[in-house]
Structure formats: C-alpha cells, structure tokens
Image: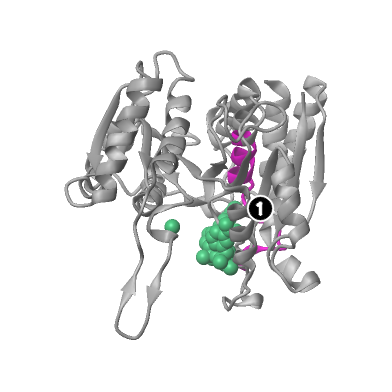
Amino acid sequence: KGGKILVLPGDHIGPEVVAEALKVLDIIEEHNGVKFEREFDLCGGCSLDKHGIASTEEVLQKSVEADAVFFGSAGGPEWGHKLPNPESGLLRVRQKMQIFANLRPCYFASQSLIERSPIKEELIKGVNFMLIRENCGGAYFGKKVENEDYGLDPWEYTRSEIERVARVAGALAMQTDPPTPVTSVDKANVLANSRVWRKIVTQVFEKEFPKVKLQHQLADSLAMLFITQPTRWNGIILTDNTFGDILSDESGGLTGSLGLLPSASLAGAPGGQTGQNSVGGARGLYEPVHGSAPDISGKGLANPVAQVLSLAMMLRYSFNMYHEAEVVEKAVEKVLDAKDIGGLGLRSGDLGGKAGTKEMSEAIQSEVKKL
Ligand code: NAI
Ligand code: MG
C-alpha cells in the first residue's frame, strides 16, 4: 500500500493549492494507516530560475520512477512565452511519461453551481461525462513541414496508439455496473485516419469489452450537441488529440467553472497490463485545468478545489483507492453546497464569494475527517 508521489508544485498559486491538497492526503494517510513517499521538485519558472531549464533531466527521470506525479501549475508573465518558457517544463514531463490518455470530467462539483453554467438549467442539470483525449499522437506530433508558402501537420494514427487509448476507455467503462456507455468521436466521413480510428476502436471493444455499449459520433455535430443536449453524452467520450483539445475546452465551458476542474493524464489503463505502476494502478500525472493565476498569487485567494479534485483522481487511478477518492469528492461537494455547513456554502473569489484558500481548504479537510 501507499506508493511514491513526485510533487511538482510549480509557480504562483501552484504551491499554494498543492500544499492544501496535500493536507487532505495527510488525513487519508492517518485514517488508513498508509504512507505515501513524497518527493518535491521544481518544474516551470521556478526551475528556469534555478537551473536555466524548465524541467531538469533529473526531474524527468523521477517522473517515470514515481507511481504518480502531482502537478500544480507552471508559468507567469515574468518568464514570458519565449522558449524555453515555464510551460515547456510540463510538456517535457508529459512527453517523458508517455501519458497518452488525458481525462477531463465534466460535471458539477456541487449542484448549487448549476447557475454558473451558460447553458439553461433544464438542459445542463445532471451532466456527467468523462472526456478521454488521446494525447501523444495525431496532428500535434509527427514530422511537420513549414516554410514561407507551405505548412503540413501529418494527422496520423497507428493501430497501437488507437488500441492503447481505447483500452483506457474500456477499462474505465468496466468499473461500473452496468458498464458505462462509451461514445467514440471522429470525422470518419472525411478523414482516413478517423476511419482507421473507428474501425480499431470497434475491434477493441468487440474483442475486449463486449459488455460495453459503444457508439460513434462525428466531432462537428458533437460540438453542437454538447450545447443543445449535454446530458445525452453522460458516460465516457473517447476522442483523438485535435478533437479532444477543442471538445475538452468546450466541455469545461459547459459548467462555467473552469477553475474547479481537475484532470488526469494516464500512461496506461487503470487495472490494465500496460503503464502500470508499482502499486497496481496506472502511472499518471494529475493537475488542475486552470493555470498559475499570477493575478491572485501570494494573496491567499486561490480556490484549492480543482487541485483537491485532482488528488481524488490520483487516489482513484494511480492508487486504486476508489472509496477515498469518493470521500474527497463528497467533501468538496458538501463545502460548496449551501445546506450542510449552515448557510450559503463556501465560495472563493472565482465563484463570486469571499472565502480564501485557507478557509476553503480547512472546510474540506474537516469534511474529509467526518466521512
Ligand atoms: P489561469 O487559469 O491561470 O487564470 C485565469 C483566471 O482564472 C485568472 O483570473 C485567475 O485568477 C483565475 N483562476 C484560475 N485558477 C484559479 C483558482 N484556483 N482560484 C481562483 N481563481 C483562479 O489562466 P491564464 O491567466 O491564462 O494563465 C496564467 C499562467 O498560467 C500563464 O503563464 C499560462 O501559460 C499558465 N498556464 C499553465 C497551465 C499549466 O500549468 N498546466 C495551464 C494554463 C495556463
Ligand atoms: Mg486546449
């Protein structure tokens, strides 16, 4: 039990919210009698300042030796965007870890947040899906050509690249009873690589996950249907790098609370054979969707919720601690909800309230202790 976590707090609010999330982990350790080995290192602007590079070879090596990487956020105006920029540190870690499946849930951490959605309440109520984006292939990688008059990004996928990400979707689907339905998203009507994607995804599910209901959807129509019928996609959505980039930002927009969203990037299927870590979970990197928020850093104003929910994802996928993950998610929900803590529920500045980082964090911790 337990395992090894590489903690990379990063810049600005990164260290502020990571410290609070780790207090939640302290409580879980104490309660369960498990102990995680935690190693801290630099990634981002803080590493640029000290080493002249946004993530050192040593950090890259540690990231593949750890069972999970717990990441805050990297970047800030003081470092600019010219390469090497702080964000390149995270890209290097991602590349080294080969975390090919990026998971972003779309749901309301509290029903009281529905009012923040730009979508009508009766349409968005009950939305709950997990978007899985292939993150190591497709149009964003491969041999590019670029000159004055011509640009080319080869949009290619191989069988093994498609199979491994399809297996993450299948393994996740099988964790519920009945299995969670999966929607695979492509543009098979025009793209050759999409037709191959569709065929191989279908093969993987027929052969390895016959109990899972699989349907296919074209990416452009899904972009519209996300807005007009968001709950129709409840379950798992599986898609490639390009469509996943666009659709995951759109799905973040659906809830209107981008600052509350966690993410996981996995190098294998939970409970699967590949990409497993030393404790039997999937090796992965966990981070909030938001950035380093330099405008509010150092003031104790950052909302720790996305970082805490990222911790819950880490417990679930890398450490097989399903119950504990749920406890953390429920604690967050209670704190954000009005009823149980007498009055209005806690709201940090990003949610239109006045609660600070400490106040939010302490309320979450005390709920975790109760559950
Ligand atoms: P951002 O997400 O850092 O901030 C956008 C707005 O949301 C800001 O007004 C900020 O104060 C607020 N916000 C974000 N997280 C919050 C939280 N936890 N609590 C309360 N308010 C929160 O995005 P922005 O401003 O575009 O980027 C800032 C820096 O972060 C840039 O250097 C960018 O490159 C970097 N960045 C890093 C990412 C990463 O490390 N994975 C992801 C996105 C941006
Ligand atoms: Mg994007």
Q: Which residues are magenta?
A: 295-313
Residue under the image location 79 percent in, 22 percent down: 31
Tally the numbered discs: 1
Q: Residue furthest top?
A: 177
* Left or right side of 207 for 324: right
Where residue 257 appears, x then y in whole percent?
A: 46, 48
The one nearer the camera, 262 or 63, is: 63
- Residue 205 higher or lower than 62, as above or below: above
Q: Which residue is situated farthest in the left direction here? A: 189
In what element is the residue under mark 1? strand
Q: Residues within 10 Å of mark 1 (few under 14, many from 20)?
A: many
Q: Is residue 183 left or right of residue 160?
A: left
Is 97 on the left or on the right of 133, as rendered? right
Quarter of the figure that contains the C terminus: top right
Q: How is the image coloured?
A: one colour
**Which quarter of the rendering shows the N terminus?**
top right
Ligand 1 closer than 8 Å to the CB at disc 1?
yes
> Ligand 2: which quarter?
bottom left
Could you tell me residue 304's position as x and y percent? 64, 47
Residue at screen point 57% across, 27% down? 273
> How far from the left and from the top, in percent, is residue 182?
34, 29
Which residue: 80% across, 50% down? Answer: 40
Residue 57 in sight: yes
Q: Position of residue 114 (x, y in %)?
A: 40, 39
Q: Which image quadrant is residue 277 in?
A: top right
Where is residue 123, by image quadrant? top left
> Which residue position is annotated with label 1?
72
User: Does 303 lie within the magenta span?
Assistant: yes
Q: Would you say residue 107 is visible in this rendering?
A: no
Rendered view: 131 above or below 96: above
> Which amino acid lies under the numbered mark 1 shown in the image of this protein?
Gly
On whether residue 107 falls in the magenta region, the answer is no
